[in-house]
Amino acid sequence: MTDNDQSTNFTHESSQYLRIPLNRIGPVIGVKGVNREKIENDTLTKIIIDSDTGEVEVRPNKDLKDPIMLIKASNIVKAIGRGFSHQLALKLISDDYFLEVIRLKSYIKGNSRSQYQRIKGRIIGKKGITKKTIEELTSINLVVSGNTVSLIGTYEELQVGRDAVTKIITGSPIESVLGVLEQQKKDEKDGEDKLWKSTEDDEPLEEMIEKFEKESDKEEEDIFKDFEEEKDAEKKEESETEENKEESEIEEKKEESETEENIE
């Protein structure tokens, strides 16, 4: 390794090794090394590139705790090597995104250059329209480079995208493949719309808030009403007590008067 071959506290046994095309070394490093530095900082790794052979070593640095980050850094470099931009490749730092490389050699008998060109042409389409449509309908990022087709996406997106690409590679009509993708996208949207409509049908948010406010106001009114009734009851009780007291005093006075008359 000739590019910034600096030692670390880790053994080389834990390093990841790969090779990228010479013309993709520049995009990995970036202007003044900014791309490589970003990958290294985000993954806590050290990326060493042999500019003569395209061999890459991804080493863990002393602060690395999660060995998965070493694999992620390697996949980011691999994705850039396969033709993805630095920005798109950085998606692979997320646990939600994965890289898949489809090797056309697995689907082609012999080593005919014309066969490779024909299949790549089918995937890309006139003015890139097929590739663009696949990306739009599956939400994956797709690059056709060399004798490979590379995809970046979530696990679910990759399943759909891989299926579409392999069908085109093996000769399925492009219109049919894209039609299936379009229908799947429509069904997915209809499902989301139905879910949203179901939520709306249950009770719109504005009505829920209005209903809650009315119920709260009613509860306050009921509490106030109960309070007023309790006050009225207390007043009535006090009034009755006062009346009973007055009646008792009258009775007492009457008894006293009768007693005095009897004495006389």
Image (cartoon, rainbow, N blue to C red):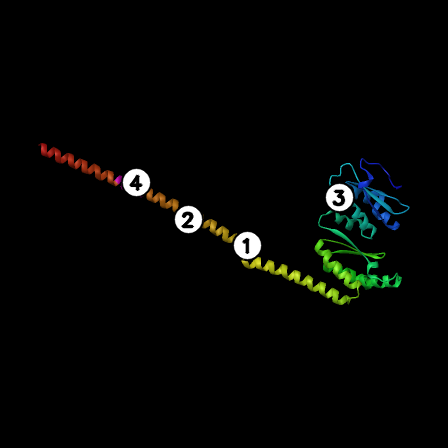
Query: Disc 2 marks which residue?
Result: 222
Query: Disc 3 marks which residue?
Result: 69
Q: Secondary structure at mark 3?
A: helix
Structural distance between the alpha carbons of marks 2 and 4: 24 Å
Q: Is residue 34 above or below residue 259?
A: below
User: Which numbered mark, 3 or 2, is in the foreground of this view?
Assistant: 3
In percent of width and height, residue 87 lies at 78, 49
Say which quarter of the image contains residue 119. Answer: bottom right
Q: Are marks 2 and 4 in contact (CB under 8 Å)?
A: no
User: Which numbered mark, 3 or 1, is in the foreground of this view?
Assistant: 3
Task: Please say whether residue 239 is one of the residues in the magenta stretch.
Answer: yes
Structural distance between the alpha carbons of marks 2 and 1: 24 Å
**Magenta segment range?**
236-242
Q: Earlier in the sequence, mark 2 or mark 4?
A: 2
Q: Amino acid at mark 3?
A: Met
Residue 206 marker? 1
Q: Are marks 3 and 2 in contact (CB under 8 Å)?
A: no
User: Which numbered mark, 4 or 3, is in the foreground of this view?
Assistant: 3
Residue 177 marker? none
Q: In percent of the image, x 81 and y 47: which residue is there?
A: 77
Q: Earlier in the sequence, mark 3 or mark 1?
A: 3
- Give the quarter of the figure containing the C terminus: top left
